[in-house]
Image (spheres, helix red, strand yellow):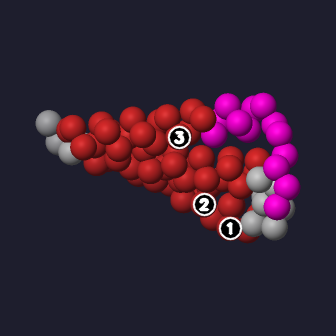
Amino acid sequence: MQFTWNTLTFINLVLSILIFIFGLVGWQRTKNHVVLFVGIAFGLFGFSHLATLLGLASSLNAILIVIRTLAYLLVAYALFLEAYRKK
């Protein structure tokens, strides 16, 4: 495992962690599943950014594709829930 510095990936990691934390705190305060799902999705994105920084992206390529796809689908599902929520 070799650390590979990339400024953009590091910024993405920090912002993903921040959104993940806000998602957890927001869900804890409001119990809104949309907020939770978006937070979890960004936590998954953060994991993929961390793997990239640690130089594991090439060896975990297939797993990272699944993780990122799952994260995008989770965001899409959360937005779908919000868009079709009964008021």
Q: CA distance from mark 2 to mark 1?
A: 6 Å
Q: Position of residue 61 (x, y in %)?
A: 77, 64
Mark 1 or 3, nearer chain start:
3
Residue at 71%, 55% (x, y): give it.
51
Q: Which mark is residue 27?
A: none
Question: Do callouts 1 and 3 mark residues in contact (Cβ within 8 Å)?
Answer: no
Q: Which mark is residue 63?
A: 1
Q: Amino acid at mark 1?
A: Ile
Q: Does 21 lie within the magenta span?
A: no
Q: CA distance from mark 3 to mark 2?
A: 16 Å
Residue position marked by numbered label 2 in the rendering: 67
Q: Residue furthest left?
A: 87
Badge 2: few (under 14), some or many (20 or more) residues near its Cα, within 10 Å?
some
Query: Element at badge 1?
Result: helix
Q: Please state which of residues 79 and 84 is positioned toward the viewer in this rendering.
A: 79
Q: Which region shows up in magenta?
A: 1-13
Residue position marked by numbered label 3 in the rendering: 17
**Would residue 76 be seen by someone viewing this image from the given angle?**
no
Badge 3: few (under 14), some or many (20 or more) residues near its Cα, within 10 Å?
many
Point out the frontmost of discs 1 and 3. 3
Query: Element at badge 2?
Result: helix
Tell me where residue 84 sits by quadrant. Answer: top left
How many callouts does the rendering have? 3
Q: Amino acid at mark 3?
A: Ile
Q: Position of residue 13 (x, y in %)?
A: 63, 40
Residue at 84%, 46% (x, y): give it.
4
Q: Does 9 lie within the magenta span?
A: yes
Q: Amino acid at mark 2?
A: Ile
**Would residue 86 be seen by someone viewing this image from the given angle?**
yes
Q: CA distance from mark 1 to mark 3?
A: 20 Å
Question: Do callouts 2 and 1 mark residues in contact (Cβ within 8 Å)?
Answer: yes
Point out the frontmost of discs 3 and 2. 3
